[in-house]
Image (spheres, rainbow, N blue to C red):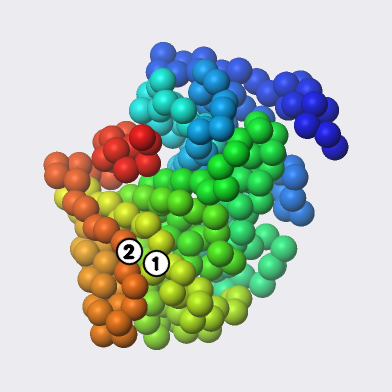
């Protein structure tokens, strides 16, 4: 399908949505072998050779539209395309683990739904559709989206990621001997030392709100998750320190950063400014 026809079909299938905060577009992405999903996006005033792409991954509430509203304000007058895929509960109930396991640790066998490499597929599609020249994209995830982001960087085959921010993740996949998805023992797909080295060398920023300490029903309280810490704040500290110590002991390149956002609780809206400072020039 040539680009003109693609753009025409996109225009037919796109709904322009208005809010007090921003204007964004909604379309359907079906250019893969998985169930189709809604995608929200915002274009800059002009797409040119310097235009970048930022993917925004929602939390467990699945409100991709709400996320892109927040981020559209930070991207105003910037030369960047925002793309927010919506992984519905009915189609991708365990998107936060890349559809590889439940949050209690049960490995899911339907490999056709695995989401490793999914964002790269979308990136290649929208890069060609909008005529963007960049070969790399940026990515942000909050809460369940942060779980998605760090696992995506780990489990995907050399993702084309320039910079990533994982904010307020509920729990993590540690690089230790714990069983997947809490650790790397018996992962559902093969991982090599190259996967690990690439993961550690990425420009990944772990952000956590200093007040994200409440334990609610939305927080994973399985045995595997509770071993990571009592709340999101402690789990973020423990995850970063564990990986940092491992890289130091094994003399591995480590390009991550860790930042506590003072006074912020479990809120994408409140976490977005610090992440935008990293992701949007």
Residue 137, image x and y in percent?
A: 51, 46
- Residue that badge 2 annotates: 255
Q: Specify the quadrant that holds the N terminus.
A: top right
Please, what secondary structure does the residue beneath circle 2 have? Answer: loop
User: In terms of depth relative to the viewer, which is nearer, 235 or 276?
Assistant: 276
Residue, x 19% and y 51% (percent of image)?
A: 260
How far is mark 1 from mark 2, CA to CA? 5 Å
**Pointer 1: what residue?**
201
- Furthest-right residue in this view: 1
Q: Quadrant of the C terminus?
A: top left
Residue 22's label in the rendered image is none
Looking at the image, which residue is at 37% across and 41% down?
279
Q: Tell me, yes or no, if residue 104 can be seen here.
A: no
For marks 1 and 2, the one nearer the N-term is 1
* Residue 166 placement (x, y as % from top left): 37, 53
Near mark 1 (Cα within 10 A), the count class, few <14, some 14-19 or many ≥20, is: few
Tell me if residue 172 comes above or below residue 281 in the rendering.
below
Task: Residue 78: name its quadrant.
Answer: top left
Q: Using a 10 Å C-alpha cutoff, classify the residue at mark 2 as few (fewer than 14 neighbours), some (14 to 19) or many (20 or more).
A: few
Tell me the element at label 1. helix
| 260 sits left or right of 39 in the view | left
Are discs 1 and 2 less than 8 Å apart at CB?
Answer: yes
- 275 lies left or right of 18: left
- Residue 10 in percent (x, y) is at 73, 27
């Amino acid at each position: 399908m040539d680009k003109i026809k693609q753009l025409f079909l996109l225009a037919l299938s796109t709904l322009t949505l208005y809010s007090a905060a921003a204007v964004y577009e909604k379309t359907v992405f079906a250019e893969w072998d998985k169930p189709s999903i809604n995608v929200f996006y915002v274009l800059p005033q002009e797409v040119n050779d310097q235009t970048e792409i930022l993917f925004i991954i929602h939390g467990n509430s699945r409100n991709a539209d709400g996320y892109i509203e927040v981020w559209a304000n930070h991207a105003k007058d910037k030369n960047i395309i925002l793309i927010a895929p919506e992984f519905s509960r009915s189609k991708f109930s365990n998107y936060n683990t890349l559809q590889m396991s439940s949050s209690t640790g049960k490995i899911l066998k339907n490999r056709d739904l695995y989401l490793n490499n999914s964002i790269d597929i979308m990136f290649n599609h929208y890069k060609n559709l909008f005529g963007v020249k960049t070969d790399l994209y940026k990515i942000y995830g909050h809460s369940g989206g942060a779980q998605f982001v760090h696992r995506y960087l780990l489990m995907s085959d050399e993702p084309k990621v320039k910079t990533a921010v994982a904010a307020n993740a509920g729990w993590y996949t540690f690089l230790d001997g714990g069983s997947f998805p809490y650790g790397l023992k018996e992962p559902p797909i093969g991982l090599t030392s190259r996967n690990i080295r690439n993961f550690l060398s990425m420009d990944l920023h772990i952000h956590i709100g200093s007040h994200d300490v409440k334990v609610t029903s939305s927080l994973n309280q399985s045995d595997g998750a509770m071993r990571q810490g009592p709340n999101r704040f402690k789990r973020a500290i423990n995850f970063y320190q564990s990986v940092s110590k491992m890289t130091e002991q094994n003399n591995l390149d480590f390009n991550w950063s860790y930042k506590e956002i003072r006074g912020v609780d479990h809120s994408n809206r409140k976490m977005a400014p610090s992440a935008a400072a990293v992701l949007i020039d």
